[in-house]
Amino acid sequence: MAIPFEELTTVFSFDDFVFRIGELSKMTGVSPRQLRYWEQRGYIKSLDRTDDKRARSYNYAAYVSVKIIKHYLDDGYTLEGAVSQMRSAIKYLTAVRQFIRHSVTSVDFEDGGAVIDLGVFDGDQQKHLYAHTRGTDINYEIR
DNA sequence: CTTCTCACA
DNA sequence: TGTGAGGA
């Protein structure tokens, strides 16, 4: 029995997570001081602060941005260079995430491996492309 | 206890 | 970018 994926796709809604500056700092290894500075420079952004909320909060997107900037920073890039790399990396990640989100329509299991339905393959919409996965190995089949 | 803004021996 | 002050 294949499991339909569409209804469970909300598990990928990482954006529902909210972090405070201290948490984001520990998660990324970037100091709160830097996070505020980067925001001031427009490199990252925190969620809107309503009247009652004086403290900054961040969503998953912000976490990803910070994580990527930090990565390139550790790699020797200048802050500006790291930000530039982050911006382009975000474009790739967005495209990949978008693809994964809509390509997987259902998942089933056969002898220790997962069989993932990647949707309609031919023009007549009669055949589907299936990915058989076992750990790192992936084999495709048109059925 | 955490976060904020501002200033800088 | 770090650090300390003085509040919230």
Image (spheres, coloured by chain):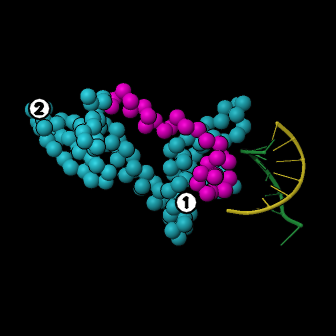
Chain colours: A cyan, B green, C yellow
Q: Nearer the viewer, residue A126 or A36?
A: A126
Pick out the residue farthest to the left: A124
Q: Nearer the viewer, mark 2 or mark 1?
A: 2
- Sort mark 1 into few (<14), some (14-19) or many (20+) by Cα contacts within 10 Å: many
The amino acid at mark 2 is: Gln
Q: Nearer the viewer, residue A27 or B5?
A: A27
Query: Is residue A76 visible to us here?
Result: yes
Going 65% across and 36% down the picture, which residue do you hit?
A49
The span shown in magenta is A5-32
Q: Which residue is mark 2?
A: A126
Q: Position of residue A10 (x, y in %)?
A: 42, 31
Q: Position of residue A111 (x, y in %)?
A: 25, 41
The amino acid at mark 1 is: Lys
Q: Which residue is mark 1?
A: A70
Compared with A76, A115 (above or below) is above
Secondary structure category for the residue under label 2:
loop
Q: Is residue A6 magenta?
A: yes
Q: Chain of mark 2?
A: A
Using the numbered discs, state the Cα–Cα distance from disc 2 to disc 1 in whole angstroms.
Answer: 47 Å
Going 13% across and 32% down the picture, which residue do you hit?
A125
- The chief SS type of the magenta part is helix
Compared with A82, A132 (above or below) is above
Q: Position of residue A29 (x, y in %)?
A: 61, 57
The quadrant of the picture occupied by the N terminus of chain A is top left
Please count the marks in the image: 2
Going 34% across and 38% down the picture, which residue do you hit?
A101
The quadrant of the picture occupied by the C terminus of chain A is top left
Q: Is residue A132 magenta?
A: no
In the shown orientation, is residue A129 left or right of residue A10? left
User: Does mark 1 fall on the same chain as mark 2?
Assistant: yes
